[in-house]
Image (tube, rainbow, N blue to C red):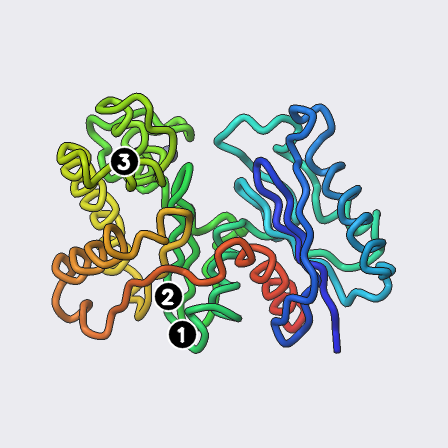
């Protein structure tokens, strides 16, 4: 059976997995990419750790059918290059990941955006198995998105498509976004946006999990949560009207909040869309969590190979 290396490169860690053509994750490995405050370029750390992982598994690159990479940032998946970033990851923009890894391992490599990979992973081995029309929405530092329509991932001309976090839901008087625009959806509906607002009420709150834990004892936080869910719903309603999905999957750490996020969000979205769009529409938490990126990266590789 064919064996693939899945690599999921995030801003703080790289996750690696050996995945077979039946979507079985046979081994996994994780390492920091920020261990020396990025003095070592991320791409170099990825190569070093991938070698170490293969060695640990007693495999040579020739044992792999190929390598699928899921990467943070705007990814030109046609050329396998990091085309842009909104954050401040040093030495990341313009990294020719595909070329570097193909030179290093002498195996074919594909590179795609992490949110697009999450979406494909869920369709291959997660909650979207069997779905032809669905959205994957990752709520974290920002908002990432993947759109599968008619069974195909929508990537656009350069593979950059799906950056739904930068839909301008508050264009006229909106907050400045990391992309340089104003009023982007993720400035209002990301987990970071929730935490920032919550800190105005309680400066000790550091992350989404702490905010959710503090809600029962703090009614003001409850109101904040309601507003935040409204912001998330507003963006999703627009997407539902454009793509008419049968399923919307929510990923990111906050997606584990079934009672406080997923259920009320599903209700709001189904109430707010035009009735014909609500029929048969489901909104659920994604299921693969930390494995979604590398699973989807391998799925992307397999799809590209079969074109
Ligand atoms: Zn933006």
- Closest to the observer: 118 or 106? 118
Q: CA distance from mark 2 to mark 3?
A: 23 Å
Q: Which mark is residue 134?
A: 2
The first of marks 2 and 3 along the sequence is 2
Snapshot quadrant of residue 294? bottom right
Asked if residue 293 is positioned above or below residue 45 in the image, the reply reads: below
Q: Position of residue 209 (x, y in %)?
A: 36, 40
* Quarter that holds the C terminus: bottom right
SS for dot 3: helix
* Quarter that holds the N terminus: bottom right
The residue indicated by pointer 1 is: 131
- Residue furthest front in the image: 217
Q: Is residue 230 left or right of residue 8?
A: left
Q: CA distance from mark 2 to mark 1?
A: 7 Å
- Point 58% across, 52% down: residue: 112
Q: Is residue 115 left or right of residue 198?
A: right
- Closest to the observer: 6 or 255? 255
Q: Position of residue 74 (x, y in %)?
A: 53, 42
Q: How many other residues sit within 10 Å of disc 1, few (<14), some (14-19) or many (≥20)?
A: some
Q: Is residue 158 visible?
A: no
- Closest to the observer: 196 or 179? 196
- Closest to the observer: 12 or 71? 12
Q: Are marks 2 and 1 in contact (CB under 8 Å)?
A: yes
The first of marks 1 and 3 along the sequence is 1
SS for dot 2: strand
Q: Which mark is residue 188?
A: 3
Q: How many other residues sit within 10 Å of disc 3, few (<14), some (14-19) or many (≥20)?
A: many
Q: Position of residue 114 (x, y in %)?
A: 53, 50
């Amino acid at each position: 059976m064919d064996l693939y290396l899945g690599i999921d490169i995030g801003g703080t860690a790289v996750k690696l997995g050996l995945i077979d053509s039946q979507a079985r994750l046979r081994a996994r490995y994780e390492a920091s990419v920020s261990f020396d405050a990025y003095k070592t370029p991320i791409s170099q750390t990825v190569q070093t750790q991938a070698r170490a992982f293969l060695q640990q598994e007693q495999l040579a690159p020739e044992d792999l059918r190929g390598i699928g990479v899921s990467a943070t940032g705007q990814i030109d998946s046609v050329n396998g290059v990091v085309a842009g970033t909104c954050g401040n990851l040093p030495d990341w923009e313009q990294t020719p990941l595909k070329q570097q890894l193909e030179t290093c391992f002498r195996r074919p490599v594909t590179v795609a955006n992490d949110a697009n990979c999450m979406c494909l992973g869920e369709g291959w081995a997660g909650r979207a198995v069997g779905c032809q029309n669905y959205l994957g929405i990752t709520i974290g530092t920002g908002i990432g998105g993947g759109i599968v329509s008619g069974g195909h991932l929508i990537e656009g001309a350069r593979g950059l498509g799906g950056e739904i976090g930068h839909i301008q839901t508050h264009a006229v008087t909106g907050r400045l976004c990391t992309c340089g625009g104003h009023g982007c959806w993720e400035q209002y509906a990301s987990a970071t946006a929730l935490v920032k607002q919550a800190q105005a009420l309680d400066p000790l709150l550091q992350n989404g999990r702490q905010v959710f834990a503090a809600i029962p004892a703090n009614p003001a936080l409850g109101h904040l949560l309601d507003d935040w869910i409204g912001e998330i719903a507003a963006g999703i309603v627009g997407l539902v009207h454009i793509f008419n999905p049968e399923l919307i999957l929510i990923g990111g750490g906050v997606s584990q909040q079934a009672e406080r996020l997923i259920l009320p969000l599903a209700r709001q979205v189904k109430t707010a869309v035009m009735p014909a769009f609500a029929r048969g529409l489901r909104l659920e938490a994604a299921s693969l969590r930390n494995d979604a990126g590398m699973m989807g990266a391998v799925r992307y590789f397999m799809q590209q190979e079969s074109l």
